[in-house]
Image (tube, coloured by chain):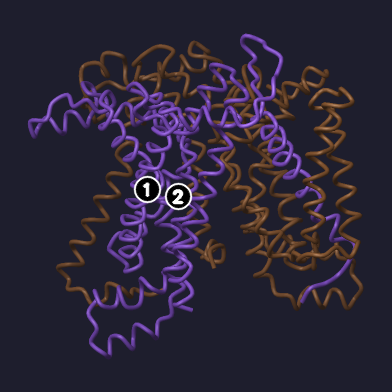
Chain colours: A brown, B purple
Amino acid sequence: MSGHGLTGLSPWSRRVVAVGVFLWCLITVFPLYWVVVTAFKTPPGVVGGPTYLPFIDFTPTLQPFIDLYQGIRGEFFRTFLNSTIVGLSAAAIATAIGAMAAYALVRFEFKVRLGAGLVFFVLALGGYLLFNATFGFTRPQALLLAFPIALVAAVVANRLPLPGPILGNEDILFWFVSQRMFPPIVTAFALYLLYSEIGRLGFQLIDSFVGLTLCYVAFSLPIVVWLMRDFFEAVPIEVEEAAMVDNVPSWRIFFGIVVPMSMNGLLATFMITLAFVWNEFLFALFLTNSRWQTLPILVAGQNSQRGDEWWAISAAALVAIVPMMIMAGLLSRMMRSGLLLGAIK
Amino acid sequence: MMRNDPIKHVFIWPAVLVVLAISIFPLIYSLTTSFLSYRLIPPIPPRVVWLGNYSTLLQEPRFWSALFTTTLIAFIAVALQYAIGFGVALALNARVPGERLFRVALLLPMLLAPVAVALVARMMFNPTMGPLNQFLSQFGLVNLPFLTNGHWALACIIAVEVWQWTPFVILMMLAGLQTLPEDVYEAAELENASAWQQFWGITFPMLLPISAAIVFIRLIESYKIMDTVFVMTGGGPGVDTETLTLFAYQEGFKKFNLGYTSALSFLFLIAITIIGVAYLALLRPHLEKRR
């Protein structure tokens, strides 16, 4: 790490740059400071105009937090618990299966025929229409029937010498990452319809732990695969080759050697995924309504429920923000060791 | 080295299955729904209208205004994020005094929930009780209509987007700056190139691929903007700040007009694909020249 780029500048212009960065830092920190102090204000302390310094400008109080805990402004405690449970499990599952997929894409060779992909899509779409329109199955039933048929047909088709290009690991990776490009509203809305029709068949997915977690796992997988691939590529191949000479099976190489060696990367990926899920709003808005509501929904609702009660709104926002503040501290410590460098190469 | 071992299927299939199930299912589902006239309230049996929903949408001024608003927010916000983020990253990389202190603080915003950030923004922009009002009233600008005037509201949303996502650009550009080779700069120093020349001659072109990727990611993500707007203005005043996602939400969740909303989300998908492909096509010659 070196200081090029600005080395040619005079001490005076260095000072200007420092002031500029400091200014940006101030802009970044001030709103955060503001929400922290406002959360400890009493109602008169807010309405009387902006005040900045606790004990000097106003007398701090814990009342907003007590109100929150007592559930006066919605069931904060349970919602916090929901967010924690869903966030931790979705991040853990996504990191686990995403890391496995990323490892497979780094170390093993895959060949998928474009023809097989087309077979899958055509059969899934056609099968769905056929089952729904001709045989009179309900829409989710038709989908659930068409999906495995299309999948099996595609796997078989992949073995046949179909014409057309053969896709490799890079293309599979691109497919994973491109899922992020999807506007989530497309998925969220369709998932809502699908979940509610599956619910009519007797298996509740809307406002349930399984439904929400499943959706978040899928939603985080592209990022996990993308990040973890870089971490695994950084693992020296010689270690694995040595293990292979000793006839250690692949799964033991992965769990016994590769995973411990990329623990830092896994942790960072887990935390980034957790942050995504913790903050996510749109899916939670569509897929939950009471029991499994997450924090962002409740926090967003504070606004309209009671008007401009800033002390309480600040306390609510703070509850959603503080866990991520702690994570930012942890992440930035990891980053100092150049951890995320590999991720963008 | 690539190994070939049947166990690879065990490794990759769980992820592929989950992503396929959660992306292909809804895709097929909403694609087929978008050709139907299908409402839940009042409940009418679905009727095939083929491209009817699409043509209604394309004639709907509200759709075009949402598309325009989203594009405006995305492009302006990303341009500002990139400019500020690049500048701050350069300064941090040059070891500006106090640089270590800044790092955690500069990272924070991108990890916070957009909903909470938007709430904080509402407080900051409050026309009577907010600190920004107090600050500006010292310059004689009292009670500005931050969120109640269409243009101001748009500017405020862009400001919040910039506040929240510039850290991402800083983070990525900083990582990129640290990969640059030292010797090129030493050679430039020998040639007596000024800092300005060094930036345009070396730093900027060498970081172009990373910059392109960062701008691409931010642009795509910005097009999905919803939570910030939802909390800050709710799309108002009127529909002045309504974005595509918010429009789709209003149509789908408030009016339960399923076919229409599916068509809308597909048009959204098409728009984002066009923008993505156009961006990559425009950039490709520049990226390849540098290699």
Q: Where, quadrant-wise, is the N terminus of chain A in this rendering?
A: bottom left
- Which residue is tagged 1? B75
What residue is pinned by disc 2?
B219
Q: Is residue A302 left or right of residue A55?
A: right
> Could you classify mark 1 by the number of other residues whose Cα lies within 10 Å: few (under 14), some (14-19), or many (20 or more)?
some
Query: Where is B83 relative to B177, above or below?
Result: above
B125, above or below A96, in the image: above
At a point 51% along the width and 53% down the height, the residue shown is B276
Whether residues under marks 2 and 1 lie with C-beta atoms below 8 angstroms apart, the answer is yes
The residue drawn where x is 65% and y is 52% is A224
Which residue occupies the foreground of this view, A301 or A31? A301
Q: Specify the amino acid type for callout 1.
A: Phe
Q: Chain of mark 1?
A: B
**Residues at marks 2 and 1 on the same chain:** yes
Q: Position of residue A21 (x, y in %)?
A: 27, 56
Q: How far across and down, in percent of the image, does residue B134 sit? A: 16, 29
Q: Residue at x 64, y 30 (%)?
A: B34
The residue lying at 74 percent from left, 60 percent from top is A259
Quote the CA–CA distance across marks 2 and 1: 7 Å
Is A74 displayed left or right of A88 in the figure?
left
Chain under callout 2: B
